[in-house]
Amino acid sequence: MNVAARRREAVPLVRFTSPRLCPVCRSDRSTALHRQRYALFDDSDLPAETTIVECDDCGMVHAASGAQADDYCRHYARHSKYDTAVQVSGSGETPADARRLDELVGFLAQNVPSLADHGAAVLDVGAGRGGLLAAFLGQGYDRIIGIDPSPGCVEAMRAHGIAAEVGELEQSTWPTDPGRFDLVVLSHVLEHVFDVADVFDRVAQRVAAGGSIYIEVPDAARYTVERFPPFYFFDPEHINHFDAPMLGRLASRHGWEVAAPWSRVLDLGAGQSYPAVGVVLRRSNDSASIAPSSAAAAIERYVEASTVAAASSVDASKLEALIAARTPVVVWGAGSHAQRLLAQTGLARCAIAFLIDSDPGKQGRSLDGHRVVAPEDGLAHADAHGASIVVAIAVGSELVVDMIHRARPGIPVVRL
Ligand SMILES: [Zn+2]
């Protein structure tokens, strides 16, 4: 029984209405699971609040708000974070990452029949810096194309000898386009997509007869608060929450089926393991029965665990002390973790002087009215003004704390 059905039994259902239809089945009927707020960049196109809902008709868990497809398109066009940062889907720039991507190509070679021929054409949509395609190239596949909206990413791919184009799936042709592809890869793309059904159709049209699609997304069945900050997986850019059965249901609605499932854990470094789920899809006329998604139930457990973790955070008491003493505070981090903390904790009540972030794409902009500066400038100013630094980054915060202690031993640091 899905969450909506369980709720209907327990309480009279107050239906959630949102301008965003279900991205998988386009139903307008859903049940709210959680409300998530974010502090925003002053020039942001994203919503300050989303409601995580379960579709009453197909069970798809997604983030609903007043924002429309155009708002997300504008956001990605203006602020693609992957042209400067290492992306979770794999840049291949560390040995562990390169090894993992090699293994993925091995898995695909075994499960995509067309890849028996090294002349197979492969398209990676939203290829980032081309880590996966570099692994394909390394294993002897040379008819590969990466497309990405970020010019910086496309430049990085070309530097690896990969044919790459700046663009979106919506564009019909790219200069190096062979027309139809034996494999189309969507790795860590669909969780960002406003209209998943529409994108699936567009992808399917680009697959040659006998060809396959590989989809990989964060696994909503395995979101965890272990070694991640509470609510970490409700990233403002991640508006769809799939599990393996939901990927199967999505495929089935479009005349495809799962040929090979893969469940994976991505090493983000610093001991943090990111749960991901993948499927190789092939065309099919069978409507085989698919297990119901348990994503909504898993998300409900995750919200409970995040709520408990947030309430029991030791450093929250240190934050209250900073607020009481009116100590000048510099926040290190302007990413999604800081955006959640500024909206949902006492952090915004601190005497915040400015924010520090190492991402040049964030520097010079304002988050929640506070200027974002580069680390070197920020540390010097924080030291000169007797500020405390609150480290508000989700991945690798220990390394940042160590670095601050080494660079400026006198500055007090609180980690949130
Ligand atoms: Zn639906």
Image (cartoon, rainbow, N blue to C red):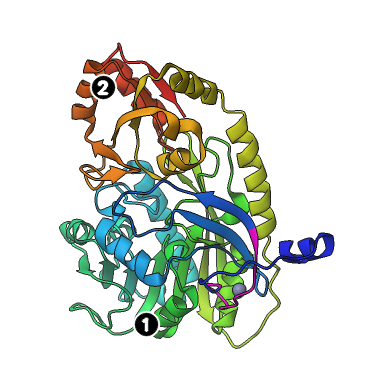
Q: Where is residue 239 in the image (x, y as percent from the top left)?
A: 48, 61
Q: Where is residue 322 in the image (x, y as percent from the top left)?
A: 44, 20
Q: Seen from this angle, which residue lies furthest top?
A: 410
Residue 303 left/right relative to 339: right
Residue 161 vertical placement versus 82 (above, below):
below
Magenta-span inclusion, residue 29: yes
* Residue in view at x 50 percent, y 42 percent: 273
Tell me the quarter of the picture where residue 21 sits. Answer: bottom right
Disc tally is 2
Task: Choose between 179 and 250: the one closer to the eye.
Answer: 250
Task: Choose between 183 and 375: the one closer to the eye.
Answer: 375
**Is label 2 in a helix, a strand or a loop?**
helix
Distance between mark 2 and mark 1 Cα atoms: 53 Å
**Is label 1 in a helix, a strand or a loop?**
loop
Q: Which mark identifies residue 362?
A: none
Q: What residue type is labelled 2?
A: Ala
Q: Which mark identifies residue 382?
A: 2
Task: Choose between 101 and 375: the one closer to the eye.
Answer: 375
Ligand 1 image-quadrant field: bottom right
Q: Which mark identifies residue 206?
A: 1
Residue 111 visible here: yes
Residue 350 left/right relative to 145: right
Residue 170 left/right relative to 364: right
**Label 2 or label 1, whichever comes before in sequence order:** 1
* Residue in view at x 43 percent, y 62 percent: 192
Q: Position of residue 348 (x, y in %)?
A: 43, 35
Q: What residue type is labelled 1?
A: Arg
Residue 127 visible here: no
- Residue range in magenta is 22-32
Neighbours of disc 2 within 10 Å: few (<14), some (14-19), many (20+): many
Magenta-span inclusion, residue 16: no
